[in-house]
Image (cartoon, rainbow, N blue to C red):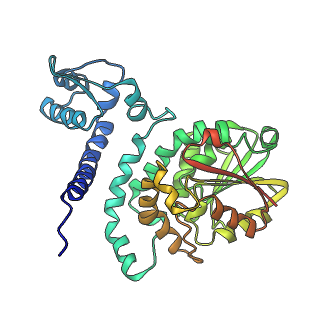
């Protein structure tokens, strides 16, 4: 047998051990969010565990151990002379403020769903098939909604839709919008809030997601301005839409070409299809330099590919489809004028405007 390269083994151990540390820290991040620890630390300056326990009403001994675990992970600063911990403004913008465009705290609770559904996914490896978004642990949909909110507020609403040629005057004047694969309704509601004259309809095949969307719209006072229907993307009703949107949903569909073709057929004259997809290279080897790729391929394996394989068509584009494959889907569906937009405001997304 060829002797092992001990330096290479040491490197492998270091990489895997580091990942073990990351995974073990994730539940601590969820606890910090649920218990208000990050929000308490944000902007407060250096605090002791006793001071944090007093402000949060929590048990000091648990708070102390949590602080130490999060500090050695690099998320908190620590002063040994005073035994105080600090959350910097930079980390607060990622962990303590859901409205910040840099917020990532919403991702962590969704990890519970990935573990909870792992046995199902293992079975698909052996037998084929898949499961839709609505079949996953409920933490997944809630995490997706929370995680995408800042990206949609600061990206979709503020930059991506306005970059679509000629759409803002139409929305101001009362354009009709079909939001396909709307899930729990976040994107549809945000569009209707930003452009109150627009008429927005969200479509999704998941009954529970649509029920949540309707409830969320009612709580936001959006009755009559946005509606939701249970429908497949390739067969949803209506037509004459000024804009049809696929917000992070096209790759999840069993028949993305059919969905795009139906979107084209449902457009008004001079209507537009807007596609929002995760950032991915056209060649896999180029994704090694993509900071999103590690997350994207994991989510694709555990969620998005099973979603497509559970549906008729089973195209399985995967989360990391890349611009060239997305363009192929759109042009094959008759959307032959495709351009990439809003690149400067979409560091982790591909935004495509498509027209017949």
Task: Please give the name of the residue rendered at 17% of the width and 76% of the height, measured from the top-left corner.
Answer: 1
Q: Nearer the viewer, residue 76 or 143?
A: 76
Task: Please give the name of the residue rendered at 18% of the width and 58% of the height, measured from the top-left corner.
Answer: 6
When asked about the image quadrant of residue 7, the answer is bottom left
Q: Is residue 268 left or right of residue 288?
A: right
Q: Is residue 279 left or right of residue 57?
A: right
Task: Please give the name of the residue rendered at 84% of the width and 56% of the height, measured from the top-left corner.
Answer: 268
Q: Is residue 305 left or right of residue 119?
A: right
Residue 148 in percent (x, y) is at 51, 45
Residue 111 in percent (x, y) is at 35, 53
Residue 201 in percent (x, y) is at 68, 53
Q: Is residue 236 visible?
A: no
Q: Nearer the viewer, residue 334 or 249?
A: 334
Q: Image quadrant for the C terminus?
A: bottom right
When asked about the image quadrant of residue 4, the answer is bottom left
Count the marks: how many? 0
Task: Please give the name of the residue rendered at 52% of the width and 57% of the height, measured from the top-left corner.
Answer: 286
Residue 250 in percent (x, y) is at 61, 61
Establish if 244 lies above or below 29: below
What residue occupies the far right of the structure in this picture?
Answer: 269
When asked about the image quadrant of residue 45, the answer is top left
What residue occupies the far bottom of the structure in this picture?
Answer: 127
Q: Is residue 285 visible?
A: yes
What residue occupies the far left of the structure in this picture?
Answer: 61
């Amino acid at each position: 047998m060829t002797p092992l390269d001990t330096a290479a083994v040491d490197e492998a151990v270091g990489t895997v051990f580091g990942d073990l540390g990351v995974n073990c820290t994730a539940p601590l991040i969820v606890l910090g969010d649920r218990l208000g620890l990050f929000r308490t630390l944000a902007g407060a300056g250096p605090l002791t565990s006793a001071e944090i326990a007093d402000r949060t009403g929590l048990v000091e001994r648990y708070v102390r151990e949590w602080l130490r675990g999060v500090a050695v992970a690099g998320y908190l600063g620590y002063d040994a002379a005073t035994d105080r911990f600090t959350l910097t403004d930079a980390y607060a913008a990622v962990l303590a403020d859901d409205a910040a465009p840099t917020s990532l705290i919403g991702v962590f609770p969704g990890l519970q769903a990935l573990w909870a559904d792992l046995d199902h996914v293992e079975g698909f490896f052996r037998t084929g098939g898949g499961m839709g978004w609505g079949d996953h642990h409920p933490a997944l949909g809630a995490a997706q909604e929370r995680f995408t909110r800042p990206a949609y507020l600061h990206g979709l609403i503020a930059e991506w839709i306005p970059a679509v040629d000629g759409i803002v005057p139409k929305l101001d004047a009362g354009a009709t919008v079909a939001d396909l694969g709307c899930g729990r309704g976040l994107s549809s509601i945000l569009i209707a809030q930003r452009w109150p004259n627009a008429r927005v309809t969200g479509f999704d095949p998941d009954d529970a997601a649509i029920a949540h969307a309707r409830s969320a719209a009612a709580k936001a006072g959006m009755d009559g301005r946005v509606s939701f229907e249970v429908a497949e993307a390739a067969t949803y009703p209506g037509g004459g839409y000024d804009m049809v949107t696929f917000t992070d949903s096209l790759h999840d569909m069993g028949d993305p070409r059919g969905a795009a073709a139906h979107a084209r057929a449902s457009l008004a004259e001079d209507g537009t299809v807007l596609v929002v997809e995760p950032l991915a290279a056209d060649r896999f080897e180029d994704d090694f330099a993509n900071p999103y790729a590690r997350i994207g391929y994991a989510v694709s394996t555990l969620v998005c590919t099973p979603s497509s394989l559970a549906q008729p068509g089973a195209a399985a584009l995967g989360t990391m489809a890349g611009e060239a494959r997305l363009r192929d889907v759109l042009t094959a569906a008759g959307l032959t004028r495709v351009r990439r937009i809003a690149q400067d405001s979409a560091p982790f997304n591909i935004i495509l405007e498509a027209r017949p």
